[in-house]
Image: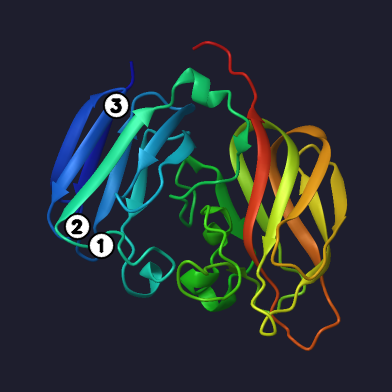
Amino acid sequence: MAELKIIICDKDGAQKHQVQGEDQILMVYEGEYMPGDRILFETDETDSFYVIRVDGSMDEAYVYLTKEQVEYVIPFDEKKVSYNPASFTGQRHYITMRKAEGYENGYYRDLAKNVMDQHGDTGCYPHAHANVETRGESVFAARNAIDGVLANELHGAWPYESWGINRQDDAQITVEFGRPVDIDRICLYTRADFPHDNWWVQATLTFSDGTAEVVKMEKSVKPHVFHIEKKQITWIKLSDLIKADDPSPFPALTQIQVYGRNQEQKPR
């Protein structure tokens, strides 16, 4: 059994609330979050799958933890704009953590989705990072491309957050899975706030196994779906983004979905 803890700490590291237990725990935190507050998720069993809900207004996150402690910083001010306005507000907060069931680990799913992704190496996968995020603003952060929110007909605050490239020709985004996965389908939701937005007509998908595929796209609100030969990988990168011949200089990515299954793990 995994020993689990959820701890709320303030900006100085002082503990405000804690729960602990085996395999499945939940916390109802009575109190208003303050700037600098963070949620610590702890386990004594790493390199394992967990299901975590960081806020009652958000979906559960199916994640792979490689560290004994994952720190989730509560977003405030500009950092909060890319989240549901109801999230992390009020005087009562519902937070959960459990070991994923074996059957869940065998699902065919979007392996890139992680609603609790944040900047930096948190030990919580999947994780998205990029070489550029427009003006460093939260509504254009790499994490927005794997948060599960698909609204793409506007740009800016939730639910229209996206990965913005700041007009950078060499922009690229990488999704790391933290473990080997088998994948065979990729969906790209490009932002479609026309005529404000441009769009990409071509991009390159590079995989950790050393292979790459060039994909074609068009002006569309709908997802671009690419069926690929089954691959065993640990990361995927989207790069070499070629814009359409259009006056707008603003193409962007709303979501990248990478479908497949976890590679079967050996018994611990």
Q: Quadrant of residue 106?
A: top right
What is the x, y in percent for residue 20? 20, 30
Of callouts 3 and 1, the N-terminal one:
3
What is the x, y in percent for residue 2? 33, 21
Up/down of 49 relative to 53, above or below? above
Q: Amino acid at mark 1?
A: Gly
**Residue ID for mark 3:** 24
Residue lying at 29% horizontally and 44% vertically, measured from the top left: 40
Residue 231 versus residue 71: which sits nearer the camera? 231
Label 2: few (<14), some or many (≥20) within 10 Å?
few
Work out how far the residue at label 3 is from the one at label 1, CA to CA, in angstroms.
27 Å
Instruction: Tell me the element at label 1.
Output: loop
Residue lying at 31% horizontally and 22% vertically, measured from the top left: 23
Query: Disc 1 or disc 2, which is closer to the eye?
Result: 1
What is the x, y in percent for residue 167? 70, 79
Of callouts 2 and 3, the N-terminal one:
2
What is the x, y in percent for residue 100? 43, 26
Residue lying at 31% horizontally and 50% vertically, measured from the top left: 55
Instruction: Tell me the element at label 2.
Output: loop
Q: Are marks 3 and 1 in contact (CB under 8 Å)?
A: no
**Residue ID for mark 2:** 12
Q: Quadrant of the N terminus?
A: top left
Residue lying at 85% horizontally and 55% vertically, measured from the top left: 215
Label 3: few (<14), some or many (≥20) within 10 Å?
some
Q: Are marks 1 and 2 in contact (CB under 8 Å)?
A: yes
**Residue ID for mark 1:** 36
Residue 235 versus residue 140: which sits nearer the camera? 140
